[in-house]
Image (tube, rainbow, N blue to C red):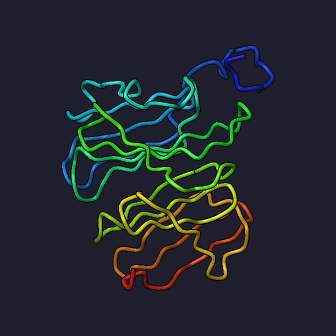
Amino acid sequence: GRSGGITPDNTGAEEHGTATSISESSVKPGVIWVGTDDGNVQVTRDGGRSWTNVRAGVQGVPPGTWVGRVEASHFDAGTAYVTFEGYRQDVFTPWIFRTTDYGATWTNLSANIPEGQVVRLVREDLRNPDLLFAGTEFALFASLDGGKSWHRFNNTLPNVNIQDMVIHPREMDLIAATHGRGIWILDDITGL
């Protein structure tokens, strides 16, 4: 059913869309991106007074697929990244998309991330828009060319689910939170 396999509750709460990710533009105040557990991607350009569902421009992802994360670009207000997690429907395809026009069109950036690596989130570097990091079900991937190609980033990181990432704005460390109840820090990514 629509609940993704969750046992129904008397209130029907599992049947309603829930915001799973919110990301506000650091470039232009009032631009906010939201992803939901029923597969929608919404954007507001006026601080929430009006919203536009821009999910229709995402091609190749089944309707209703859970939005993992949205990430507003640090360089352009109309640019954002979104990931979808299909494992709840037994679909293990990696999905990463980018828009540069406020969601009117989306480009698939999943490139060479192997099948089975469900992508949880993407983070854009704070200084270089071509440097992206993707946290998946089993690994961390990095792209030096804006998502055209990805490289698995092993460097002492075991096979582990990456749940969240942040780039420290002063130290330029990549900090990854894992499902293995750990935090992994890559010291100073300036060289990338």
Q: Nearer the viewer, residue 92 or 6?
A: 92
Percent x, y of residue 93: 63, 42
Q: How many marks?
A: 0
Percent x, y of residue 158: 72, 73
Horizontally, residue 27 falls left or right of residue 184, namely left
Horizontally, residue 59 falls left or right of residue 90, namely left
Q: Which residue is located at x 52 percent, y 63 percent?
A: 165
Q: Which residue is located at x 61 percent, y 40 percent?
A: 85
- Quarter of the picture containing the N terminus is top right
- Position of 147 relative to 86 (above/below): below
Q: Which residue is located at x 58 percent, y 50 percent?
A: 119
Q: Where, by quadrant of the figure, is residue 153 drawn?
A: bottom right
Percent x, y of residue 176: 57, 68
Q: Nearer the viewer, residue 185 or 117?
A: 117
Percent x, y of residue 148: 41, 57
- Position of 72 relative to 176 (above/below): above
- Quarter of the picture containing the C terminus is bottom left
Q: Where, by quadrant of the figure, is residue 74 drawn?
A: bottom left
Horizontally, residue 94 falls left or right of residue 180, namely left
Q: Where, by quadrant of the figure, is residue 55 drawn?
A: top left
